[in-house]
Amino acid sequence: GESVGLHLPTLSVQEGDNSIINCAYSNSASDYFIWYKQESGKGPQFIIDIRSNMDKRQGQRVTVLLNKTVKHLSLQIAATQPGDSAVYFCAEGYNFNKFYFGSGTKLNVKP
Amino acid sequence: GAGVSQSPRYKVAKRGQDVALRCDPISGHVSLFWYQQALGQGPEFLTYFQNEAQLDKSGLPSDRFFAERPEGSVSTLKIQRTQQEDSAVYLCASRTSGSNGELFFGEGSRLTVL
């Protein structure tokens, strides 16, 4: 199968700081990438996506950066809040099918 | 509700029992996915439907796993002769047609095999 991995399994940040969560992917044919947030006992929740023809996309307090040269994806969360504490997954896919997920990064936001 | 609904939320089975997990996707969503999530891991792809057609079942771990979506809406994931390694959360997701790849996930069915 495909390989989607994360550089850091856990990340602790102070409330109000910016957070950066990184992800490496292996399939150069992947054309679509998504970040999901998963809280305990719940299903993953969509945060932001980016297509392979873009290198940056911004949402509300979140930015996704894509570097196809090194097959790297990152999620930046501005002014991190306690409600952002969760596990974050990146996922890659081709033609919107068969998305592959990484193993996740746990984000702890300290008040 | 308007979201993806899965049942049961929790299932305890004795090794060797058969189980059936149900997914009710968002109305009108064409695509439906099943994922398996082990504790502390990311979701692993199992199978994918477009309407009633099962287009990809390459992630099903063995022939004990079977999924169906006979009328293109509700889907059932069946696991025969359950084994301890089948213990996991089984997530269902649906997606509308078109060029948006966003998957809407249910809360999952947690299966524990004793």
Image (cartoon, coloured by chain):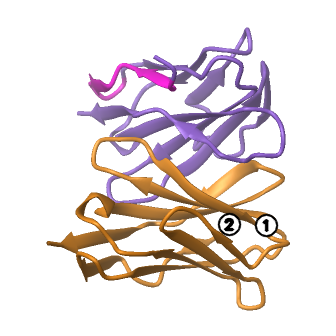
Position above or below: B112 against B72: below
Of the numbered discs 2 and 1, the one sitting upstream in the chain is 2
Q: Quadrant of the N terminus of chain B?
A: top left
Q: Which mark is residue A2?
A: 2
**CB under 8 Å between discs 2 and 1:** yes
Chain A in the picture: what colour? orange
Residue drawn at (63%, 71%), measured in percent from left and top?
Answer: A3
Q: Which chain is purple?
A: B
Viewer can see residue A41? yes
- The chain identifier of the residue carrying mark 1 reads A
- Residue type pointed to by label 2: Glu
Is residue A96 found inside the magenta-colored segment of the image? no
Magenta residues span B3-16
Is residue B80 visible in this depiction of the protein?
no
Dot 1 corresponds to which residue? Answer: A30
Direction left: furthest residue? A111
Residue drawn at 84 percent across, 70 percent down: A29
**CA neighbours of label 1 inside 10 A, class few (<14), some (14 to 19), many (20+):** many
- Residue A95 lies, in percent from the top left, at 84, 52
| Residue A25 placement: quadrant | bottom right
Q: Residues within 10 Å of mark 2 (few under 14, many from 20)?
A: some
In depth, the one of A21 and A91 nearer the eye is: A21
